[in-house]
Amino acid sequence: MGEHFDKALVFTDLHIVAEGEDIITLDPLARFAEGLKHALNRHPDAQHLILLGDITHNGLPEEYARLAPVLAECPIPITVTMGNHDTRAPLQAAFPQAADANGFTQSALDLGPVRLLILDTHDYDNQAPLEQDGWLCDIRLTWLDAELARAAREAKDVVVFTHHPPCPVGFWAMDAIGLANSEALLSRLHAAPHVRHLICGHIHRTIHASAGGLPVSILKSPCHQIPMILGQGTSADSVDEPGAYGILLALEGTIVVHTEDFALSDGAVHGGA
Ligand SMILES: [Fe+2]
């Protein structure tokens, strides 16, 4: 008998566009719908669905609205946060539960023994130097401080989620638009020994990293990916490779992040190989 892991599904960088539009000929809504159906079929025991930013491509109300019928099929609670492509008012209109008391899309929830802290790194007032990079303002960092202290008091391990990774990953154009004040985040996480793992999006590529010793998992998009060309290119460069979602397994003392390329096979399992 194996250990029981509590489980959450994580999709990032959906990039939903308006009806009739595409991204490098791909239909982001169809890709997400296929991925979500796959995930819910394969993981009926998942307890949460987390949407980790860049929900839409242009931040338009009609783009968010297209998600409603797909998410209506989802029987588990949904937690959403923002990426650089999102805009706050339409996202919070589509997901009213996403807004916190300060008007940001940050939330804390429990996955079995582990507290998930989902941060909002959208740079809403252009404090970061570039348009697409991320920022955590004092209000959001104060919220994080309070949640880290609460988790410590309650003896909870913590997994943190941010759309923008706080460390460079080798794609220069993406590194230029990472979390601009990453030290403000990492100094807090490094000072909190109960923080076990960080999960990010933004890059559109499966990446394993450590940021000052903190393990980081970066997940692919269900739609378009960044080409595996390190050290050159632009943040808009995209390639049609299989879409993916993440599966977070939480056990006291152990955090596991799987990534599933949902269009790679029909799932038929063959013995005797
Ligand atoms: Fe993205």
Image: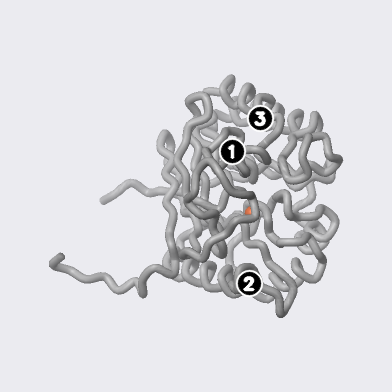
Residue at 54% x, 58% y is 225
Q: Nearer the viewer, residue 75 or 193?
A: 193
Q: In the picture shown, does residue 253 fall above or below 41?
A: above
Residue 265 in the image, given as x and y percentages of width and height:
36, 71
* Closer to the camera in the image, 60 or 169: 169
| Secondary structure of residue under mark 1 | strand
- Secondary structure state at the residue bearing disc 2: helix
Q: 246 and 41: which one is in front?
A: 246
Q: Nearer the viewer, mark 1 or mark 2?
A: 2
Residue flagged by tag 1: what amino acid is it? Answer: Val
Instruction: Using the numbered discs, state the Cα–Cα distance from disc 3 to disc 1 in whole angstroms.
Output: 13 Å
Mark before the other along the chain sequence, 3 or 1: 1
Residue hosting label 1: 160
Q: Residue at x 76, y 28 (%)?
A: 142
Classify the position of ligand 1 by quadrant: top left, top right, bottom left or bottom right. bottom right
Real-space Cα separation, disc 1 to disc 2, in angstroms: 26 Å
Horizontal arrangement in the rendering, residue 9 relative to residue 17 (left or right): left
Q: Amino acid at mark 2?
A: Leu
- Crowd rating for badge 1 (residues with CA inside 10 Å; few <14, some 14–19, many 20+): some
Q: Kindly identify which numbered label has been placed on residue 29.
A: 2
Mark 3, other Cα within 10 Å: few <14 / some 14–19 / many ≥20: some
In the rendering, which numbered label is found on residue 182? 3
On the image, the x and y values in percent for residue 264 come to: 39, 68
Q: Give the distance between the C-alpha atoms of the residues marked 3 and 2, in whole angstroms.
A: 31 Å
Residue 19: where, in percent of width, then height? 73, 78
- Say left or right for 51 vs 205: right
Q: Residues within 10 Å of mark 2 (few under 14, many from 20)?
A: many
